[in-house]
Amino acid sequence: MDEIRLVRGAEASHLDEMARLAGSTQERPERHTPYLSTTVAGIRSELAETNGWSERTVRALDARTGELVGWVLPDIDPELGRVWWVGPVVAQDHDWGAVAAQLHGAVALPSDVTQQEMCGDERFELLGDFARERGFDACRASVALNCETAPAEVVGPVVRPLRPADHVAVTTLHDDLFPGTHTPGRALVASIDPQKLRWVIGEPVAGYVAAEVQSDGLGYIDFLGVDPEQRRQGLGRALVVAATRELFARGVPHTHLTVWRDNVTAIALYRSLGYVAERTFVPYRRGFR
């Protein structure tokens, strides 16, 4: 077993080495997690923006050299009573299972956190075994798709920015389509971040799309929702095209999204717009209803 020393908490001065270590593992499918960017700069920004990262991070240092060999960050949403385990991240020349177990065991979660989730590339078998040993269940997998060229503009349904008068309709539709997700409807419409796009279609609202320019400079489509009674009318296509084109207009090098692997209709739509499937992610959950 690796001789390591665990340190609870981190400072801003530790961000660079934490990001470099994660960046080196994110390049490998068998160590990749969707919770982190694929670039060192992006990872650094994501960590710094995570609420409570400094006091919640646990670092593993080589007992002889003091070198950082691993870390884990429990990203906690107290309102949902949920934690997303960012990591464990472990250096490639160390025993992943042994270091991960020590890192994970060093975290004491608040008593009101009852839901836990880990997630990794389907080839990240070490994480899958680690999660199942701790009572986590493998859940519905998602496919990550990437687009490097803006699709042609759609002529037809008008997509417009979200207005305050749309908030109730979008909140209701979102919570109906995505119950229990990481971003409830009220949070989706409350954002005033200029990097986040919230567009709708229809009068009254028949669909919406949520997208953003991430901290790593990449475009991301987070949610796409269309009223079930209004589907097969091209509304989803119009929303995706509008969001993707706007992201490229803002200078992103490419944009990406995830969709459930068994949602073949949505995957076919995205592929028809130039999105290419790159990875498949499996979430592992415990305590979810």
Image (tube, grey):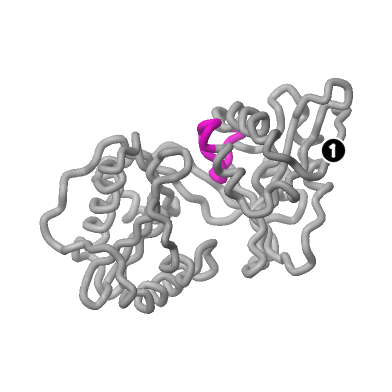
Q: How many marks?
A: 1
User: In the image, what residue type sits under mark 1?
Assistant: Leu
Q: Please, is residue 233 above or below residue 274 in the view?
A: below
Residue 220 appears left or right of 45: left
Q: Does residue 26 appear left or right of residue 73 in this picture? A: left
Is 242 rendered above or below residue 251? below
Please identify the residue farthest to the left as the structure is shown.
Answer: 155
Residue 116: percent from the left, percent from the top?
68, 58
Q: Quadrant of the N terminus?
A: top right
Q: On the rendered image, what quadrant is the C terminus found in?
A: bottom right
Left or right: 266 as drawn, with respect to 92: left
Dominant SS in magenta? loop
Q: Residue at x 39, y 46 (%)?
A: 213
Residue to which mark 1 is pinned:
6
Q: SS for tag 1?
A: strand
> For residue 265, what is the image quadrant?
bottom left
Tell me if residue 267 can be seen.
Answer: yes
Q: Residue at x 73, y 45 (%)?
A: 57
Evaluate whether residue 137 shows in this view: no
Q: Residue at x 79, y 35 (%)?
A: 60
Residue drawn at (82%, 55%) of the image: 108
Residues rendered magenta in the picture: 30-42
As drawn, is 84 to the left or to the right of 262? right
Is residue 264 on the magenta stretch?
no
- The image shows residue 98, relative to residue 65, as above or below, that is below
Q: Residues within 10 Å of mark 1 (few under 14, many from 20)?
A: some
| Residue 238 picture location, percent across and down | 22, 57
Q: Is residue 37 part of the magenta span, yes or no?
A: yes
